[in-house]
Every structure is written in C-alpha cells, then in structure tokens.
Amino acid sequence: MAQASPWKRKLKNNITGYLFLLPTILVLGTFLFLPVFYSLYLSGHKVNLLGEVSYKWIGADNFVRMSGDERAWIALKNTASFALFVVPLQTAFAIMLAVILNAKLRFKNFFRIVFFMPTVTSSAVLSLIFMWIYNSNGLLNKFLELIGLQGYNWLGDPAVAMKAIMLMNIWSTAPFFMVVFLAALQDIPDALYESAMLDGAGAWRRFFSITLPLLKPATFFTVVMGIIGTFQLFDQSYIFSAGSGGPNNSTLTVALLIYQYAFKNLDFGYASALAVALAAVIMIVTLIQRKLFAEEKLN
Amino acid sequence: MKKKSGLVVLSLMLVAVLMLSACGKSGGNGNSGTGATNNGAGEPTKEPSAEQVTVTLAGWGASPEEQDLLNQTLKEFEAKYPNIKVNYEVIADQYMDVIKTRLIGGEGPDVFYLDAFEAPGLIEHNVLEPLDQYVTPEFDVTDFEKPMLDAFKQEGVTYGFPKDFSTLAMFYNKKDFEEAGIAAPPTTWEELQAAAIKLTKKEGGKTVRFGFGVAPELARQMFMIQAFGGRVADENGNAAYASPEAVKGLQLVTDMHNVDKASGEPKEVGAGWGGEMFGQGKASIVFEGNWAIPFLESNYKDLDYGTAELPTVNGKQGTMAFTVAYVMNKQSKQKEAAWQLISYLTGKEGMKTWTSKGFALPTRKSVSQELGYDKDELRGAIVAGAAYATPWQAGATLPTIMNNFNNQFVDAFMGNSKLEDAMKKAQDVANKEIAAAK
C-alpha cells in the first residue's frame, strides 16, 4: 500500500489542482483557445456559414490568394508605416511626459491626472471627438488658419487621412506608457545622479547616460506593446472611414480588412487566414525585437 | 489526507454550482420565449382556434417621428390580428452585419427590413422565404411600382415586398438662385454646370458655398455611368465601369469639381451629408431624396427651397431609386403570422398609415394616388423620377464592386488621379477579388 500510494497521491493532488483550475480553463478555453483553434481550422477552408453551411478543405489556397490580393498588401503597408511612425513617437513622447512628472513639480497630481486622461477615455469616443476637431471647419483648421497656415480636408484627403489617425493615436496611447516609464524612473537611485553631478555632468548628460540606459527594460516593454497595439489598429480607422478604409485605401488596416472580408463579404475562411497571417507577422516582429534588445543587454 | 478529500469535494461543488448556474440561465431564456406565447392563451380572442404567437420584426433606427408612425401602424395591426404580437426591435448600427450574423446563428428575426442593394446577396445564400405561395388575390401584387418590386425578385420568384422608396430629385435654394439671377432650375447638365459656376461663392480664396453639392459614391453616381450607355456590372457579376461610355458620364461629375471648381462634397465644407450641406447654405443645389424633406423641415425651418427633376444628361432623363422591403426569414417558425405582418405592412391599409405623413413614399400606385404625393409641391419631382429611375442594385457582387469604386472615385474626384486610370484600377482590383472569392 505504501508503495502504490505516492503515484496515486500525486494523481489525486493533480486532479484537485485541475478542478480548481477548471473554471478558468473553461472560460479561457471557450473564449480564447477555442476561437484561436477554430480560426486556424477556418483558415484552411472555404467556408459558407449563411444559408447552407459548408466547409471545404482547400489547403493553403487562402494564403496563396493573399499574395495576389492588392488590398491585403496595401493594408499591411499602411499598418507597418503606421507602426513605424507611431511607436517611436509615442515612446519618446511617453518618456518626455514621465520625465516632466518625475521632476519636482508643483501640482504634480493634477498634471498626472490630466496626462492620463486620454488613456482612460474610450477610443471610440475619442475618435468621434477628433472627427469634430479634424472637420474642415473644425478646431484644428481654425487654429492652423490663425497661425497663418493652410488647413486640410483631414478626413477626406487620402494624403493626410492616415496622418490624422496617427496623431490621435500617439496622443491617446502615450500616457499609458508614461505610467510605465514613471514607475521605472522612480526606481533609479538618486545616488547615481548625485555622483554624476559631482563629476560635473550636466542635465543632458545625466539624461542620456543614466536615465535612458536604465529605462531600457521599460522601453523594450513599451515598444513591444506599442507594436502589437498598432498592428491591431481597427476602431479608429473604422470610425474615421465609416468602415470603408478609404479614401483610396489610405486608412485601410489589416484588422479592418479582416472585418470587411468576414462581415461584409461573409468570407470567413479567407478572413481567418488573414488573421493568422497578421498574428504571424506580429510574432516575427516581436521576436526580432527581442533578439535586438537581448544582444545589447549582454554588452 | 482527510483535508485533501475535503478540497476535492469543495472544488467539485464549485464546478457543479458553475455548471448549474449556466444551465439555469439558458433554461430561463427558453422559458421566457414560450412564456410570451402562452400569455394570452387563456384570454378569449376573436378567433379562439388561433394560437397566440409572437413575431419578431427588425429594422434600423429612424427619426422619433418616423418611429412613432411605425409603432402606430404596428398597433393597428395588432388590433386587427389580436392573436399576433409583434416584437419590434431597432438595430442601431451596422444593420446588415448584425442581421447576417444573427441569421448565421439561427437567431434571425422573423421579418426584417432589406435594402434592395443587399437583396441579391441574401437571395443567393438562400436565407429568404419565397413569398409567392402566400400571396392572395386581395393583396394585389400588380398595384406595386414595377421597378421597386423587381428589385426583390430573382428568376420570377418574389422574396420581399417594398415598403417605401425614394428617388433622387434636385433640391435648389430659391434665394441663392434669385441672387445669382437664375430664373428656373436647370433642366440639362450644361445648364446645371453654368448655374453651379454662377452660384459658387468664394471668400478670401476659400470656397464658402459650392454651386453643386455632390456625393462621390457609387450609390449616387450609378445613373451617370449609364447616361452614355455604360454599365456598373456585366452579366457575370464583374465590374464594368471602366468602359469609355461609363467614364464619359463620370467625367462630367469630376470635371465640375476639378475644372470648374463649382462643386464639392459635404466633407469639404465640414458637413456630414448633402442635406446638411444644403441646409447650412454651403451648397445651392444638391441631389437628395425624400428623406431630406423632413430633415430640412425640422432643422432648417426658414430655408426657402424647391425641388425639380434631375437635369437630363446626354439628352436622357435619369435618377437613382432606393427602396427597402420587408422580407421573411426562411428559418422562421411563425411563417403564417410573419406573412400576415408583411401583407398588412405592405398592404393598402398598412402602407397608407406608414406613408401618411410623407416620411416615406408609398410603393403602391393606389396609395400614392390616394395620398396625392404626385401633386405635392416638394415630393412631386421625387415621385415623377420613379418612371425612369435606376434602382440601386447590381447583383450579389455589388459590395465588392462598390467598395473599390468608392475608394478610387474619391481619389479622382479630389484630383489626385486621372479618372480613366482610377476606374481601370478599381475595376481590375474588384474583378480580381471577385474571381478569388469564387
């Protein structure tokens, strides 16, 4: 009995553990893993769900189709250029805000609340507010006129429509990362700054030689999260273009394209394939970053 | 050891509770569904043999006045058929996405609104109930305006009956016309062009009022494609709007914007749509439908405007017609009652109530005559267009065709690309997507 029991006891313990996990497993399974596997399954099929339901296995055809889909390439290009523009700027902006708040300011808490406000506001609501600001007779154009510059048709002109979304996105996401940097800043020991000052380092020198290098883990986190977030851009371009991705595909993002194929064309198979491809792209970009940051860490 | 078995029991209980609560929830839902139908079973009704049934009706939102009118029509229906209860629900946004998703999930409403432009797609997917078998002689199908009825027909089978319609008419600002010394509304495109140039007003290099307010999208420009013999789509459902004939018509639209600088889209002056642009006095002429009349009346009361039929293009009359029908879900469990609802709402009696206030125009000739909209000062031009209008519809592939057209046409309209190239590009991409989806 004593010999058989350790194995049995282990099993019993494990069962208890899994039972405790069961609610979480059920919830995650239903709402996370099941959809992930289902969309993997769908991506290899030609699917018709409306009317007569049919699944036809077509192998990698959906992925082959992607290479010839001009709008998919435009969407990827738009999304990538969006990330390339937004991520560095939002990171720099976040560091700047964090450094300002970390300085010994008056009314520090007041500024903290003001800076953080855009992040706690719903992005759908922000988009609607910004649509008013970007209106041809809106606040931004009036301001530009006031300082003698020419206004734009921000939402209707393909040349600037995406820029308008970029500006808004930087403004609304930077404060979240500001909080990350603020926490990291407070971890930097004052002694470092004091000794640097004794050595005669100026404010800039201290910022570039102490603050920035010590913020590297936070910066890595920010850049990774920023890239994932920007690659999944949907709501803002959806609201700005009323779902079309126009004018001239200039606000078309991959997530918006997936939505169009799934719900406008009811082509769930191809839409799932696009979603899988987007996940792969995000994963690859993140891995590359990890490699870059990790190598520098060794030095 | 004892403690551990206690934990096992505890976690088992937790699981059981979770599962039970989940079951209880779905059970409750099932009960509430049948509860509604059982409610009136005990009450005596006019037809005691008839069972009490609930029919769900889904539509998109409209102005409060319109909503009241529909509710009134439904109340009259329920009074006439006491055994049928109508459960009316408004889908506020992205109507077709919601309807399609619900149809996929088997939770679709029994009866719902369907825009003519979406009809071929749903008919192709075989989710709509053919209605011919239900039609009785009293329903009088021939009374409907033929183009509106045909929009919901495929191969001779009728899938929906149009509840109302509107064509586009020319709305013009009488005060602006007087100031510019234009006596009568333009009747040809050349006259429209001349009038628009005269009516355009600039202040400090910035246009504050366009002569003509235009919507650069396929739904509003389809008749311009057809004016010189062009087509939106061919027999195979492929896009065909890059033909020289089609481009010729569209060129007139883009030239007025880029060469004459006498037309603009609502966004350029910060308006949301043509009616608003017109109401704010930022355009002297717009092509809009019946929906603009109640809007202008409630938002811009003092505006002095008139309507006229659209100017002729290439010597031919043309306009767009938009229509919406009531259709029945093929999976409906209350088909008889659902038909009763459709036949009442699109019948002479129901349609008269629904269109009595002029928010919508009747698709039945008899109702139209009775209410006298053909002689109405503002609505006469809209009714007259029905005779030669192009219904907004072009096969099941229209969503793809439209998306690519709108994307490229705006670009050409803004002067960023040449119209021929833009249309060629839109057509090629659309046809590639259509081929890939097959």
Image (tube, helix red, strand yellow):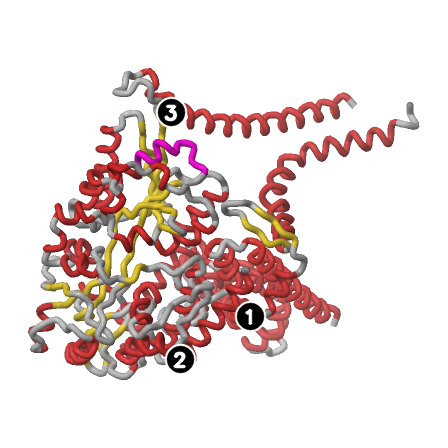
Give the chain of mark 1: A
Residue A73 numbered mark, or none: 1
Q: How far across and down, in percent of the image, does residue A48 sit?
A: 55, 50
The N terminus of chain A - image quarter: top right
Does mark 2 fall on the same chain as mark 1?
no
The foreground one among B365 and B121 is B365
Left or right side of A177 for A214: right
Is label 3 in contact with label 2 (beta carbons under 8 Å)? no
Left or right side of B379 for B110: right
Disc 1 element: helix
Three-letter residue code for mark 3: Thr
Q: Residue at x 43, y 60 (%)?
A: B399
Is label 1 in contact with label 2 (beta carbons under 8 Å)? no
Instruction: List the residue tagged with mark 2.
Output: B420
Q: Residue at x 23, y 49 (%)?
A: B363
Give the foreground label among 1 and 2.
2
Q: Which residues are magenta?
A: B331-341
The quadrant in which residue B420 appears is bottom left
Three-letter residue code for mark 1: Trp
Instruction: List the residue tagged with mark 3.
Output: B37
Q: How far across and down, in percent of the image, does residue A64 sit?
A: 63, 65
The foreground one among A221 and A206 is A221
Q: How far across and down, in percent of the image, does residue B338 sit?
A: 35, 35
Three-letter residue code for mark 2: Glu
Disc 3 element: helix
